[in-house]
Amino acid sequence: MVEVIEDEGAKRSRDSSHLTEWIQAYRPQTLEECALPQRIKEQLQLYIDRRFIPNLIFAGSPGIGKSTCAKVLGNYEGTDCFEVNCANVPSPKEFKQKVDRFVTSASLFGNTPLGKKVIILEESNELSKQTLAYLKKKIEDTQEGCAWILTTNVKGEIPSAILSRCNVVDFNILPDRDDEGEMLDQVSDLIQEYAKRDGCSVDWEDKKVKTNLQKIFKRHFPDIRKIISEVNIRCTPKGYIPIALSEY
Ligand SMILES: Nc1ncnc2c1ncn2[C@@H]1O[C@H](COP(=O)(O)OP(=O)(O)O)[C@@H](O)[C@H]1O
Ligand SMILES: [Mg+2]
């Protein structure tokens, strides 16, 4: 009988050949599914309950749920929504054309369960000064029919004239609130739920598993995207593989 000797790497890749990419496949579709401090959940839920959405700026570090929440509102009950990734806009001219086409068209017939149609500007801090000046005027001119949601990693790069026309939602963990505790519990629940969906039988109480998870959370929090991805690659149908963290 031939004995097949597998090294650890081969074993792992065989075990993980089933891998579902959680951040893609299980991206939250509703506010309830997001791991967020209560203060943010309540604020965004209020817009849904009142069926009224103001202009918004979602500011905070990468991987914390800004785009996810923008999409939850923008896609709410088939809302007429237009999304621009400002990091990929080829020129100010093209940006204006795209935006103008949307704001002048669909409003008459578009679906607006939150009272307005929605324009999401991802990575809005990437816009040039010239485009930001145009945007300020556009936000003012369209306020009756359109709600703008700007996401940004750096609030300081958005001109104050735009900030003052929007409600700023600070996604960063605020030290004077219980943001961190609230988030950690929810992220743990999400991870366990995703592992279950994938049929990964993990003993979450196992000491090695716990220690490894703690290290991942400590290293990457509050980058939820990173935490979920790191746990994702360690979860297999046979259980959790507590691979050491890489150095970066
Ligand atoms: N607060 C969160 N709750 C649940 N999942 C999250 C959260 N933040 C990030 N994620 C996960 O990470 C992925 C990327 O998040 P995203 O909203 O694009 O982050 P950001 O825009 O803040 O950089 C999402 O698809 C989701 O799987
Ligand atoms: Mg984003």
Image (cartoon, rainbow, N blue to C red):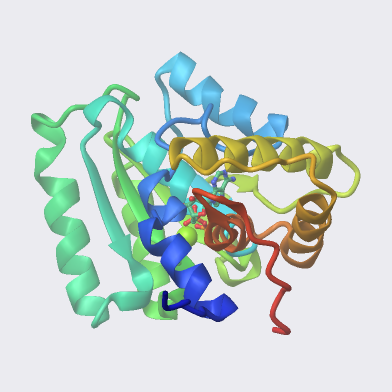
- Quadrant where the image shows the N terminus: bottom left
Q: Nearer the viewer, residue 64 or 123?
A: 64
Residue at the outermost top position: 49
Q: From the viewer's perspective, is 166 left or right of 186?
A: left
Question: Is residue 209 among what the camera can see?
Answer: yes
* Residue 49 picture location, percent across and down: 47, 15
Q: Which quarter of the rendering shows the C terminus?
A: bottom right
Q: Is residue 242 left or right of residue 178?
A: left
State left or right for residue 104 relative to residue 53.
left
- Residue at 51% from the left image edge and 80% from the top image edge: 5
Q: Residue at x 9, y 44 (%)?
A: 105
Q: How many marks?
A: 0
> Residue 144, image x and y in percent?
31, 34
Please state the horizontal and vertical placement of residue 231, each as a whole percent of the image. Answer: 61, 57
**Is residue 38 or residue 92 the one in the foreground?**
38
Q: Relative to 216, does residue 95 appear above or below in the rendering?
A: below
Residue ranking furthest to the front: 1
Q: Is residue 45 above or below residue 17?
A: above
Position of residue 226 measured from the top left corner of the image (x, y, whole percent): 60, 63
Residue sitting at x 74%, y 58%: 221
In the image, what residue occupies the spot 71% across and 57% down? 222
Residue 153 placement: quadrant: bottom right
Visible in this render: residue 55? Answer: no
In-image side of 88 versus 217 (left or right): left
Q: Nearer the viewer, residue 64 or 227?
A: 227
Q: Observer-nearest residue: 82 or 9?
A: 9
Vertical side of 174 occupied by 93: above or below: below
